[in-house]
Image (tube, rainbow, N blue to C red):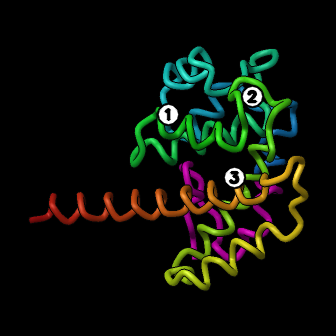
């Protein structure tokens, strides 16, 4: 079954979600992605991405190329912006990554955080009760090594919020579609 990768316009087979890193690695092989590639996969306007860089939501691209981590940060913001106000998104991402325009203080790489989220999102239908969500989060983070005490709990909370927000966005979109067809 085809499945849209959250925050993007890309579709993959849902049973291939465990290889999501490979999909993105192939897109950033040439030393990153240029702005037009990022806008093609996200549907965002270039000025939105420039604005996010200017506002310090992500580091500036190097030689006009966005790294895998930067692309994943853009996708995360794009995915959450339809449900959460920008200041809440910035606060959530800062909760695990400190100053957003610096990478030295990150407790988890943006790409790793996003790929963990994508795997959880692919299983969202199976995670509708608290126990199965807890199990899935524990499984997703079993290999995570805390760079500082409490980091794992922060990442888990962030993933939980991202998942709930993503489901809420899907529900909102479905409700709007139903309303348009009244």
Most distant residue in the left direction: 182
- The answer to whether 124 appears left or right of 28 in the picture is left
Q: Dot 3: within a 10 Å radius of its alpha carbon, few (fewer than 14), some, or many (20 or more) residues?
A: many
Q: Which mark is residue 66?
A: 2
- Mark 3 lies on a secondary structure that is helix
- Mark 1 lies on a secondary structure that is loop
Q: Return the disc, 1 or 2, that comes first in the chain's sequence.
A: 1
- Mark 2 lies on a secondary structure that is loop
**Residue at 78 percent of width and 39 percent of height:** 68
**Residue at 76 percent of width and 47 percent of height:** 111
- The answer to whether 122 appears left or right of 83 in the picture is right
**Disc 1 from disc 3: Cα separation:** 18 Å
Q: Are marks 1 and 2 in contact (CB under 8 Å)?
A: no
The magenta stretch is 1-23
Q: What residue does disc 1 label?
A: 44
Disc 1 vs disc 3: which is toward the camera?
3
Q: Return the disc, 1 or 3, that comes first in the chain's sequence.
A: 1
**Residue at 42 percent of width and 44 percent of height:** 84
Residue 156 image point, x, y percent: 68, 61
Q: Which mark is residue 114?
A: 3
| Residue 127 counted in the magenta span | no
**Disc 2 from disc 3: Cα separation:** 16 Å
Residue 53 image point, x, y percent: 62, 20
Residue 126 image point, x, y percent: 56, 84
Asked if 126 appears above or below 109 in the picture, the reply is below
Residue 28 image point, x, y percent: 81, 39
Between 71 and 147, the residue placed more toward the observer is 147
């Amino acid at each position: 079954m085809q499945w849209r990768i959250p925050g993007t316009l890309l579709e993959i087979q849902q049973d291939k979600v465990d290889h999501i890193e490979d999909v993105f690695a192939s897109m950033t092989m040439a030393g990153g992605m240029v702005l037009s590639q990022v806008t093609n996969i996200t549907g965002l306007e270039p000025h939105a991405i420039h604005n996010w860089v200017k506002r310090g939501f992500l580091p500036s691209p190097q030689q006009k190329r966005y790294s895998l981590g930067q692309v994943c940060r853009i996708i995360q913001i794009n995915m959450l912006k339809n449900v959460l106000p920008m200041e809440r998104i910035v606060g959530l991402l800062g909760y695990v990554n400190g100053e957003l325009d610096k990478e030295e203080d990150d407790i988890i790489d943006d790409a790793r955080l996003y790929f963990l989220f994508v795997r959880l999102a692919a299983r969202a239908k199976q995670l509708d009760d608290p126990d199965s969500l807890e199990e899935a989060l524990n499984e997703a983070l079993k290999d995570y090594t805390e760079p500082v005490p409490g980091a794992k709990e922060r990442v888990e909370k962030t993933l939980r919020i991202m998942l709930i927000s993503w489901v809420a966005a899907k529900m909102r979109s479905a409700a709007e579609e139903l309303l348009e067809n009244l």
